[in-house]
Amino acid sequence: MSAFSRMFSTLGIRTITSFAFVPLSIAGIAFAIHELYENPATAKDNVLLYTFWILAALFILERISSAISDFVADREARTLQHEIDLLPRILATDTDLVTFLHASEARKYCIAVADQAVEIRNTVARYGRHESKRLGTAGSYEGWLAIKRSTLTGGRTVWTELVSAHLSANDPQCQFMIEAEEKQLGYYHERIDDVTTPIINMTIFTFENGVKEAIFGYEYRGMRSTPTFLTRNRYLVEFLEGYFKENLEQARDARLKANAASAV
């Protein structure tokens, strides 16, 4: 809906409600005159009472009008914000690389497109830290975990994650992994020592039409804040897919060897 359409829509709601005041006011005045003519002895008290109810009704109608108008404005603002969050996708079709200067902006984009993907491969690298770094409300870590849960619950999206072995059991990511595997929601992960193998933080989306996107960056060991990049370039995406697969297989082999050694 255009800006002009939104404006006239909001004005229309207020205008209709304002016109509703007119017959209500006329009815109240007519009733007051009728009372003065028919029952002059009690008219004074009744007129005051009816005047009070008319004013109360007008106030309630105005509040309802304001609430409806605010609801319409908020809904359209959310729709517009979602469209803005998807702008990097438009840019990615015309260039090999789109740059996000702030990690929170990249995370916002990931949250916006995750529910459109049928497969998501994601790394959770923390480089020895025991807790995840929060990214603020605009592209929050909590929001990213929430979209993971909702896409898995919906049953359309398969997730594979390569997660830092250094995250503590109390970290929300670790709690999420336990929950997802207990509910058998199409989730698989491996743990990796990202101190000895400092992997890249990245997310690879595969959409239903076969299109793939990769987002990588966020931070690196010794660099807590770095630019983040979005690409649809086939060769770059294939390179990152191979990188992810190789590290996932190494992490799985290391886990199986550790399990075998502990069983002896």
Image: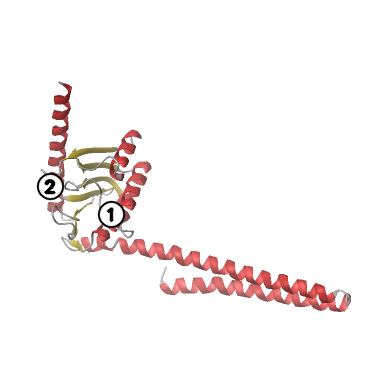
Query: Is 59 placed left or right of 181 in the picture?
Result: right
Q: Which residue is mark 1?
A: 134
Give the residue at x 28% y 41%: 174
Give the residue at x 58% y 66%: 64
Judge whether residue 185 can be spotted in this image: no
Secondary structure beneath dot 1 equals loop
Secondary structure beneath dot 2 equals loop
Q: Which residue is mark 2?
A: 198
- 1 and 2 marks in contact (CB < 8 Å): no
**What's the residue type where badge 2 is placed?**
Pro
Residue 196 in the image, given as x and y percentages of width and height:
10, 43
Spot the residue most to the top: 264
Q: Does 77 appear above or below 121?
A: below
Residue 113 in the image, given as x and y percentages of width and height:
30, 54
Residue 68 in the image, given as x and y percentages of width and height:
54, 65
Alpha carbons under labels 1 and 2: distance apart? 20 Å
Query: Is 131 placed left or right of 254 in the picture?
Result: right
